[in-house]
């Protein structure tokens, strides 16, 4: 996304009203301001998440890191669905739309495809993007529209006060599952890779450094980026990610993904990832395997099978959870190809409206 | 059974001009009969190419200069089992030397390509009508498939019609004996043989079809050659056979000077959208999911990328409108096209468009419902869904085209309203308009409405914050139109957030204030109601100006209602015709206009949806006349309904002495 065409642009036809309005506003306010500080991205709206919610941490991280991309705030659009996390756009001094449940990727697709000059972001939750909006998510990913999707996964329905979500673990007791959930959960990273997403990452709300690092790579990726952010809901699902956050257990059960580095993790690097006999991956004890058998992480592999195998290492109780960038590959973007087709059509055919209306077989009456 | 000299075609009271004779090649003496109008129906198996044949005959007829109106009628199944009743596809064409309004109540000529086509269409052919059948297809196997115990070509059951059995299949095979094509492939050209025969019978120009076939099969020259050979063979057969001693001449219809083309409703809608984009200066973005009978609009718009038109085939109906709304947010002319079931799925997003007050064009090509209903048939039963099919008070403008060509103007008018008032607009077409065709006078582009004034993107602050600093208020309204300010992303300094939650008046921030909500609900309604100020008074067609009965309709019933009114007037009665382009809001004077009449009749292809609205809004005792057969009204039936309303509403006995409409019906009035 850093390769944005910040000069406007032939957006469908030369000298159209969009370009004219943008140019006029820049003239009115001086230069496009792309050197921002975190406070430039705050709005006058009171942030209304529950005290202690993981969403605050993510909002702060985004506001702190976004200026480093050098994009003017008027060129950023955040589209969200419905849910706690989807209030996000109200707190960002950019353009934004708080839309309807599950549909943010579809709305963002239309915006990104028709306005390739914008930096388009989707903020969504596990219920929003994986239940009611599951269809839009997978299709956005397969199309590779240029946008960044932040999926806040708290494994619960918070805004509706505590029903199990499509990422809740089997057996979870909630208001709607008094005897425990009998739904098998989605692993969002596996799902995204199954849809052949070109960029998939995972980060923890409380890990500012790790989160910022994944967000930056996601934002710089051209195409659809999906970042699953583990986010604590301290009211309805408190401590859901404690196994990974707790300094005692975190190192044991998290697998940090660093491109080009061997997948060694755990206290004293005691555990590692090796190939299994069936084309997948498995966990091994580092001292039990040859060094050359330890998998070296490569997020740029064309075939998503490796990244998928990585995503399958973790279980629903979060043991052996890889954190970082699973996959980052370059493919043509939907909006780019759409713009190309328009260019080709313009070269090979003229935009003569009178000719179009009077095309085909006609006859004249004198 | 063999009619070597079929009598003139058409209703018995049609005027038939002088008969001329001339010697055709081969020495046969053939006569030429002049007619003022003909209705032809081609019926065959879905695989027989009846729609293509019909469209070609239509193009020939259009380029000849007749006025015309068509009714394609086909099953939802792409290929039902060959030769069965559910697989029958038909195409009806009415053409004339004068202005006509409908595809005709009943055919004068029926071409049946197989027993199934005969069985399912014969009841519509009036006694004495010309019936041409492909005798090759009347095999015992095909007869058994549709339940004929005996061959109707032999058992005398067709004696009431002018039946001409023609071995269309075997003559096509003979004509293509040297083409190098296999039997099965060659047989497929029998529709072109038939077209050739009809082209001879009705003196149609043939060059257009030859050019069309060359173009259509340019990558398969042997197929093009075979089809052209079959087409010519059919034409020559007509000229030389003794089976047809008469051919018919229907002179061109007088039309206003100009350039004309034949156009279907879906084509006209698509071109209207392209024109609306060009005239507003906005790039068009179509988000759509394939659905019958709206898909052709997607197909057509996909061809016009050179005009900056982006088309997005979405994963579902919801994504189609979602993407269109996202594009509108970015400043494009967002458009979504669908049919009734798709509108049901889009309802929540339409509500979001109402709340965010963004321009959006929603095109509903209505079909038979409820649920999947009758996908390929026509109905007007989405009116109330268009009006009210959303949660909350979510008003939006509703407009409807009245004929295939009028779809073009309706698309531009819908865009004008959407841009001027920052609102989603519902355009209600239907299956009959979508697939039906008529001659269309190609407009001069410079004469089309200039929509650029309606865009008016904000470029700077429009309000002051409490501390006096300049601010942008996205919900600050134009005092006249109540349209909100529209700033597109990328506009410096005007960053703002919109969404589905209730907005504070002006600032657009989230507001749960009870008084604000009440105000905003009423303001959104007032904005839509205020559109009436831009649409002019009700258009009433009442030649004498003193009719006591009015007939009111909307959408595709314009043709049948108009033809029915002509019949009524021809019988010496008086009737006023009101046909609504704008259904929400209604023209401001509509209530007063309706109150002038003793009786108001409202024919609709639903169970009385407009009638319900008119009654609710104006307390007028509207008489609803309804039909939900999936087919358009027949004008003769409507004329009877209107006549009854006139004759029973008046105390003046003179009009009851007038000739009953049924007897006075002149076929030319259709």
Image: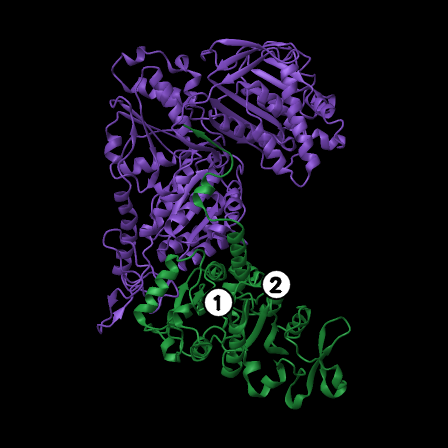
Disc 1 crowd, CA 10 A, few/some/many (<14, 14-19, 20+)? many
Please indicate whether residue A134 sits to the left or right of residue A117 in the image: right
Badge 2 element = loop
Residue at 64% from the left image edge and 89% from the top image edge? A267
Q: Which mark is residue B392?
A: none
Where's residue B425, x and y in %?
38, 47
Color used for chain A?
A: green
* Same chain? Circles 1 and 2: yes
Q: Quadrant of residue B605?
A: top left
Residue at 34% from the left image edge and 44% from the top image edge? B449
Q: Is residue B343 visible?
A: yes
Q: Which mark is residue A195?
A: 2
Where's residue A176, x and y in %?
51, 64
Badge 1 element = strand
Color used for chain B?
A: purple
The chain under label 2 reads: A
In whole angstroms, how far apart are the C-alphas of marks 1 and 2? 18 Å
Q: Which residue is mark 1?
A: A124
Disc 2 crowd, CA 10 A, few/some/many (<14, 14-19, 20+)? some
**B314 or B412: nearer the viewer:** B412
**A139 or A287: nearer the viewer:** A139
**Circle nearer the viewer, 1 or 2:** 2
Residue at 38% from the left image edge and 15% from the top image edge? B661
The chain under label 1 reads: A
Where's residue B535, x and y in %?
29, 41
Q: Is residue A153 above or below residue B608?
A: below
Where's residue A251, x and y in %?
60, 85
Residue contact between numbered discs 1 and 2, judged by CB atoms under 8 Å = no
Q: Quadrant of the C terminus of chain B?
A: top left
């Amino acid at each position: 996304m850093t390769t944005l065409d910040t000069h406007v642009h032939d957006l469908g036809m030369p000298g159209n009203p969009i370009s004219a309005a943008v140019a006029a506003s820049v003239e009115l306010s001086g230069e496009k301001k792309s050197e921002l500080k975190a406070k430039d991205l705050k709005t006058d709206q009171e942030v209304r998440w529950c005290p202690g919610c993981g969403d605050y941490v993510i909002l702060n991280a985004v506001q702190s890191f976004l200026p480093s991309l050098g994009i003017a705030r008027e060129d950023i659009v955040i589209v969200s669905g419905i849910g706690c996390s989807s209030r996000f756009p109200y707190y960002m001094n950019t353009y934004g739309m708080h839309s309807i449940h599950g549909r943010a990727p579809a709305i963002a697709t239309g915006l990104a495809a028709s306005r390739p000059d914008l930096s388009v972001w989707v903020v969504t939750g596990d219920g929003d993007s994986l239940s009611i909006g599951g269809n839009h998510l997978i299709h956005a990913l397969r199309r590779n529209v240029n946008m960044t999707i932040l999926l806040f996964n708290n494994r619960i329905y918070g805004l509706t006060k505590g029903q199990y979500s499509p990422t809740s673990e089997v057996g979870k007791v909630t208001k709607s599952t008094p005897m425990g959930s009998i739904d098998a959960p989605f692993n969002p990273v596996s799902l995204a890779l199954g849809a052949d997403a070109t960029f998939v990452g995972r980060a923890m709300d409380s890990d500012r450094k790790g989160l910022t690092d994944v967000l930056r790579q996601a934002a710089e990726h051209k195409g659809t980026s999906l970042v699953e952010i583990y986010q604590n809901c301290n009211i309805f699902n408190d401590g859901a990610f404690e196994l990974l956050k707790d300094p005692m257990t975190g190192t044991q059960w998290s697998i940090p993904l660093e491109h080009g580095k061997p997948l060694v993790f755990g206290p004293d690097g005691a555990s590692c990832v090796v190939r299994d006999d069936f084309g997948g991956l498995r966990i091994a004890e580092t001292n039990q395997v040859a060094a050359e058998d330890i998998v070296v992480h490569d997020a740029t592999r064309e075939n998503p099978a490796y990244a998928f195998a990585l995503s399958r290492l973790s279980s629903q109780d979060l043991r052996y959870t890889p954190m970082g960038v699973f996959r980052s590959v370059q493919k043509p973007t939907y909006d780019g190809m759409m713009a190309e087709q328009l260019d080709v059509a313009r070269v090979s055919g003229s935009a003569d409206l009178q000719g179009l209306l009077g095309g085909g077989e006609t006859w004249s009456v004198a | 059974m063999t009619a070597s000299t079929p009598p003139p075609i058409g209703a018995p009271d049609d005027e038939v001009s002088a008969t001329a004779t001339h010697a055709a090649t081969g020495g046969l003496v053939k006569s030429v009969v002049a007619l003022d109008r003909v209705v032809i129906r081609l019926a065959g198996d879905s695989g027989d190419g009846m729609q293509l044949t019909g469209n070609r005959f239509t193009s020939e007829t259009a380029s000849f200069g007749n006025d015309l109106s068509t009714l394609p009628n086909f099953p939802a199944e792409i290929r039902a089992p060959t030769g069965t009743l559910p697989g029958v596809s038909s195409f009806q064409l009415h053409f004339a030397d004068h202005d006509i309004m409908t595809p005709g109540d009943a055919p004068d000529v029926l071409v049946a390509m197989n027993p199934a086509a005969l069985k399912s269409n014969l009841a519509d052919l009036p006694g004495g009508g010309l019936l041409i059948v492909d005798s090759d297809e009347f095999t015992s196997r095909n007869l058994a498939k549709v339940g004929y115990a005996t061959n109707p070509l032999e058992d005398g059951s067709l004696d009431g019609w002018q039946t001409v059995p023609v071995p269309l299949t075997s003559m096509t095979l003979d004509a293509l004996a040297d083409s190098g094509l296999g039997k099965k492939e060659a047989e497929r050209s029998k529709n072109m043989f038939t077209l050739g025969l009809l082209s001879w019978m009705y003196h149609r120009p043939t060059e257009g079809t030859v050019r069309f076939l060359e173009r259509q099969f340019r990558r398969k020259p042997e197929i093009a050659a075979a089809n052209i050979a079959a087409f010519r063979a059919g034409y020559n057969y007509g000229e030389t056979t003794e089976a047809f001693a008469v051919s018919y001449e229907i002179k061109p219809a007088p039309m206003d000077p100009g350039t004309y083309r034949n156009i279907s409703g879906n084509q006209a809608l698509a071109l209207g959208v392209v024109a609306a984009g060009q005239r507003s200066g906005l790039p068009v973005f179509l988000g759509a999911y394939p659905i019958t009978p709206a898909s052709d609009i997607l197909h057509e718009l996909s061809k016009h990328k050179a005009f900056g038109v982006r088309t997005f085939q979405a994963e579902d109906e919801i994504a189609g409108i979602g993407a269109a709304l996202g594009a509108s947010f970015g400043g494009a002319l967002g458009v979504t096209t669908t049919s009734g079931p798709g509108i049901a799925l889009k309802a929540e997003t339409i509500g979001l468009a109402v709340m965010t007050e963004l321009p959006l064009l929603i095109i509903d090509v209505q079909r038979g419902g409820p649920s999947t209903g009758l996908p390929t048939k026509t109905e007007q039963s989405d009116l109330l869904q268009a009006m009210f099919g959303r949660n909350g008070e979510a008003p939006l403008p509703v407009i409807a085209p009245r004929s295939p060509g009028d779809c073009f103007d309706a698309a531009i008018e819908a865009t004008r309203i959407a841009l001027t008032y920052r609102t989603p607009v519902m355009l209600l077409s239907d299956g009959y308009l979508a697939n039906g065709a008529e001659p269309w006078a190609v407009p001069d582009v410079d004469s089309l409405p200039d929509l650029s004034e309606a865009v008016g993107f904000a470029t700077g602050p429009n309000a002051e914050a409490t501390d006096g600093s300049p601010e942008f208020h996205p919900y600050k309204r134009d005092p006249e139109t109540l349209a909100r300010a529209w700033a597109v992303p990328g506009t410096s300094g005007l960053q703002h957030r919109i969404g589905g939650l209730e907005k504070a008046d002006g600032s657009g921030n989230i507001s749960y204030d009870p008084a604000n909500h009440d105000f905003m609900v009423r303001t959104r309604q007032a904005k839509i109601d205020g559109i009436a100020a831009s649409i002019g008074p009700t258009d009433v067609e009442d030649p004498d100006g003193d009719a006591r009965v009015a007939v009111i309709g909307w959408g595709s019933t314009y043709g049948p209602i108009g033809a029915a009114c002509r019949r009524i007037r021809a019988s010496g009665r008086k009737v006023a015709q009101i046909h609504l382009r704008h259904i929400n809001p209604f023209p401001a004077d509509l209530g007063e206009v309706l109150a002038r009449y003793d009786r108001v009749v409202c024919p609709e292809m639903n169970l009385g949806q407009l009638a319900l609205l008119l009654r609710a809004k104006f307390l007028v005792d509207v008489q609803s006349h309804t039909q939900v057969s999936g087919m358009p009204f027949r004008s003769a039936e409507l004329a009877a309904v209107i006549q009854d309303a006139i004759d029973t509403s008046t105390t003046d006995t003179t009009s009851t002495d007038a000739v009953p409409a049924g007897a006075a019906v002149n076929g030319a009035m259709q």
